[in-house]
Image: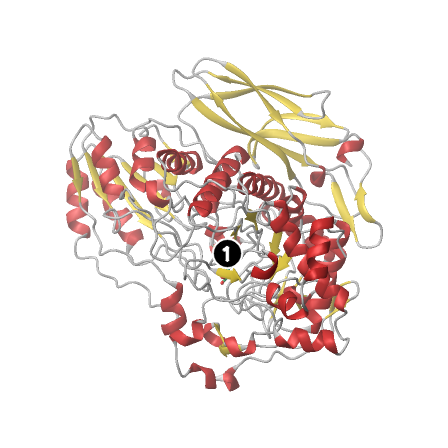
Amino acid sequence: MTDPRAGVADLVEALTRPEKLSLVSGASDPAGTATGYLPGVDRLDVPAVRLVDGPVGVRVPGKPATAFPASIALAASFDPTLARRQGRALAREALARDQDVLLAPALNLIRVPHGGRNFEYYAEDPVLTGALAAAAVEGIQSDGVVATPKHYVANAQETDRATVSAAVDERALRECYLPGFRAAVSAGAGAVMTAYNRVNGTYASEHPWLLGDVLKGEWGFSGFVVSDWYGTESTVAAATAGLDLEMPGVPVAELAPGDADTEDEQPNPAPDTEETVEGQTETEPARVGYADPARGIPDPARHDYFGEALGDAVADGSVPPSRLDDMVARILGQLDRFGLLDGRERDGALDTPAHRELSATIATRGTVLLENDGTLPIPADADVALVGPNVGEATLGGGGSSETTPAEPVPTAVGVERRAEGAVTVEPGLAPIPDLSMLDLLLSGPPARPSADGTSIDAAARAAADADVAVVVVRDRATEGLDRPDLRLPGRQDDLVAAVADAADRTVVAVQSGGPVELPWRDDVAAVLATWYPGQSDGRALARVLFGDADPSGRLPVTFAPEAAYPATGEPRTFPGVDGRVHHDEGVFVGYRGFDRFDVAPTYPFGHGGSYAAIEYCDAEPAADGRLRVRLANAADRDGRAVVQAYARPPETAVERPVRELAGFDAVGVPAGETVTADVDLDPLAVRRYDADAGWTVDPGTYVLEVGRSSRDCRLTVDWEPDAAHQ
Ligand code: BGC
């Protein structure tokens, strides 16, 4: 039970039971603007509450908003300041659309490269994820909007997302999957959204250990827990475990009339009893309230658990009345905290020049220079052949609930043409690769791969041969609701790059993807940029990087490697799961920790990324404030940016630990010819290990900090005896 402020406690006291029930059970927004809605209680001046998606833009149907780059692009900036600024901008746009709660940030750890929502998440590392999530929460809430970190927890795949059970041990949960949420909660998040999936057999939305013991207990979370849309699966179990608000959204089943009688097809995974977290035993099969489980179409009639049904449960004593009061107090407590109860004036602003500029800045800061033989930056007066199936548009993002419609997107070709001083010949080479839409997915099932139309590849190669530099822009496609079938670029894009590289002396490839992709031609081209989904500033940001107006200063927040090399993708039991369970056999060895553990060489390691400047690492020493001071010198005659990374290597221990763990990082500008100092905060997570019996443990001994440019490019080492604050 929280300890509500007096005014809130009085309000709870004054509400009737039906009023309380209406406050914990979502409804459709009569104005049709919000993603979710809570009717208010006029009699007591409790206002209606509007909840809106999402992490990269305010998604109000038919209303434009700034479309920021994918969250993975923001993560590639390794810059919490940008996350804070973006959070604030999102909040101001939400307020301008009269919304109160933003369903963001999305911060699930990237476990497998196939994850259909990886573009919406940050990273494969918990320290980076936590730093960005905390900053995003602070930014969103600094302007009076409630942030909703999501999806709590272990929601690492889209395949069977509504039913799959993540079989994951407590150490991996504590060291990898929970820290991002903990950081968001410590930053003051007012709400937390539960995941669709089960964790060790129990739905996240009714998980007493995750919601009660960890979130509200250990972490002292005093806000409210909201289910994902149609992600409540019970009344008593959910309410008593700690879910505070059931949230249905648009009744998707109405879009597919007739599907409601396909219930018999629902998967019913056999119960089993494997124990993965102490006290959490998988005994229960998935309950599936879906009109069409194969396509994930919810059945609204079976998702009304906190309305009348909760009233009955309170009446018959299976849910204590005090629990209903707590649910209401938690929601009203946040309305009070953010000024909604006293009608405080809250000011918003939409699609301002500052927001547009911020979106372009995030796109350039998140662009990763994977390879460069010196071809980049391109002289402004060079003749450029611009190739790529989608250069006529802006790559806004992936499909699903994060889709945002901007007022004035800048297509790739438009941005490049505006900036170039030489000739720009646009020759797409292939028919456009269509975006994936979650609605199409729901209504029609998984899409076919794009056609193999390659009739104009020759034309693109000819244009490339005639130009000084060929720039090929390729893309993958991703959407919520669907994992990627493989890591290849769709259609004949690999053939297109190969043909252009063959014809042109200098070929630059910009890869617009939601996560890692395979780059079979990378040794045959002059430069490769990972731009992720750049959002509305696509052409503007790419032009800045191509012509050297900005340093592409992103670093990889995920390892790039061939599909089979990833630690969790070796067999179906680890991804996408068998019999309804996905086994996290790799434990804490997620992402680069797995590549290090199994000694597999990635194509590009976590943290990798170049710069147009020449930044040297001079020296590093621990400072009195517990931070690490790193001196950097830029020997180039152009300004650049560095992302200093410090990885902790543990001493010899009896229990196997990751070879190295990111302890901290700092993104800094280093002007031409100057020396600057980076201050790296060191996260205690990098020295702690979780022991199921003893809890958090610090193995004694000297830790070595590897300071450098990536997880595999160490420039300096420093011995580190963590002080009390870091244990
Ligand atoms: C997504 C959430 C989103 C919600 C509302 C769900 O399908 O998983 O991230 O906030 O829909 O659109």
Coordinates of residue 157 in the picture (x, y in percent):
53, 61
Q: Is residue 641 above or below residue 162?
A: above
Coordinates of residue 78 in the picture (x, y in percent):
52, 36
Q: Is residue 436 above or below residue 301?
A: above
The reply, left or right, for residue 169 in relation to residue 125 is right
Of the pair 24 and 604, the residue shown nearer to us: 24
Can residue 194 be seen in the rendering of this structure?
Answer: no
The reply, left or right, for residue 121 in relation to residue 206 is left
Figure quadrant of residue 237:
bottom right
Q: Is residue 418 above or below residue 572?
A: above
Q: What amino acid is found at the position of numbered circle 1 in the picture?
A: Arg
At 43% from the left edge and 23% from the top edge, which residue is drawn?
640
Q: Is residue 177 above or below residue 703?
A: below
Of the pair 281 and 15, the residue shown nearer to us: 15
Of the pair 322 and 138, the residue shown nearer to us: 322
Can residue 530 be seen in the rendering of this structure?
Answer: yes
Coordinates of residue 293 in the picture (x, y in percent):
50, 76
The reply, left or right, for residue 709 in relation to residue 640 is right
Instruction: Using a 10 Å C-alpha cutoff, classify the residue at mark 1 as few (fewer than 14 neighbours), some (14 to 19) or many (20 or more).
Output: many
Residue furthest out toward the front: 43
Label 1 CB less than 8 angstroms from ligand 1: no
At 50% from the left edge and 63% from the top edge, which residue is drawn?
158
**Residue that carries the numbered disc 1 in the rendered image:** 50
